[in-house]
Image (cartoon, helix red, strand yellow):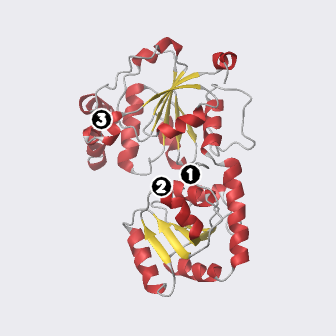
Amino acid sequence: MNESEASIYPNILLISPFWNISRYFLKYANVYYYYPKHFHTYQWYIHRIPARLKYHFSRIPQKIVNGMGYIFNPPHGFIKDIRADMIDAVIITDPTWCNFDLNRFKNAIRIYWSWDNIYMTSLIHDLTLIYMEKFDYVFSAHRETVNIFSETGAKAFWLPYFYDPDMNFPMNIEKSIDVSFVGNIYGRRKEYISFLKDKLVNHNYFFGNAYQKDQNEIYNRSKIVINFPNVGELNQRVFEALGSGSFLLTGESKETSEIFNDKEDLVYFSDAEDLLEKINYFLSRDFERANISSNGHLKVLKHHTIETRIVDMLNVTGLIKNNTSENPSMVGTKVP
């Protein structure tokens, strides 16, 4: 952007462990990026002690948890090299975990972008930070928590997950893997994976973790990608798999079905037997698989990239105007 354009762009202080997202904000704002150093140290375990106490002893009033927050997570990460009066908005993304001293930025809009709050300890921790710092807006990746966040006094919205087109995209390579799941294997996932390994003895499969740079290739080599929601949530794997152009079989959830249509964008399964039946069915139907995966990819490319999420956030908060995406990705609405 040139100097005249920069003067009319909002000035945003972005605090996030993920520096790479700043390049998308830079299309619409002047961005000052700050890395929360505690993200990669063990100090964040201390910060989360109040949330864990609340989780195990639910009767502890939230006000007391907030007070404990100042003891176990006192204001730190002082940002002294930025003029507070020139900042229009402070945006903090989960998982930051640190309590930053935002008092200097009293004239700025305070925005918290909460991603991983399906887990109760993460939700309590986010709530504690929001109460302590009095955020103006909260954007939650999960619809079920919007009402909870609205009780903090912030304007709360559902802003679902997204994918980065620079990280997940179609590749013209051979489909050499029949079935894949990329991610941590624990809980119900272990049961599903164990069941599938017993049944898919004559198939090529990949079940396990992979580096981000390898994830997209695994998806592209897979005829079928599987997703296991933990607690019925719409997780980021859905968007990443569809963003890679892959055919996705996912456990059904209320959140997911609000955005993606069964047998049109992806395919839902209900249990292990249903999953196995659908794997066998779609492995033998290349054209049908390709048609569904194409629809799913076009939908996320048009409506569910990280850039569409950022545009919607900046529009709702009034930081930019008349710059909406073709079809706003914010499915949820503000809680009155």
Q: Position of residue 287 (x, y in %)?
A: 73, 76
Label 2 close to label 1 by CB (< 8 Å): yes
* Image spot of residue 144 (x, y percent): 51, 49
Q: Nearer the viewer, residue 88 or 256?
A: 88
Name the quadrant containing residue 65.
Answer: top left
Q: Residues within 10 Å of mark 3 (few under 14, many from 20)?
A: many
Q: Which residue is mark 1?
A: 167
Q: Nearer the N terminus, badge 2 or badge 1?
A: 1
Q: Which residue is mark 2?
A: 212
Q: Amino acid at mark 2?
A: Gln
According to the image, label 3 marks what residue?
A: 65
Which residue extends farthest front? Answer: 173
Q: Is residue 21 visible?
A: yes
> Which amino acid type is marked by label 1?
Met
- The span from disc 3 to disc 2 (Cα, nearest Å) is 36 Å
Quadrant the C terminus occupies: top right
Identify which residue is drawn at 39% across, 66% down: 185
Within 10 Å of the Cα at label 2, are there few (<14), some (14-19), or many (20+) other Cα atoms?
Answer: few
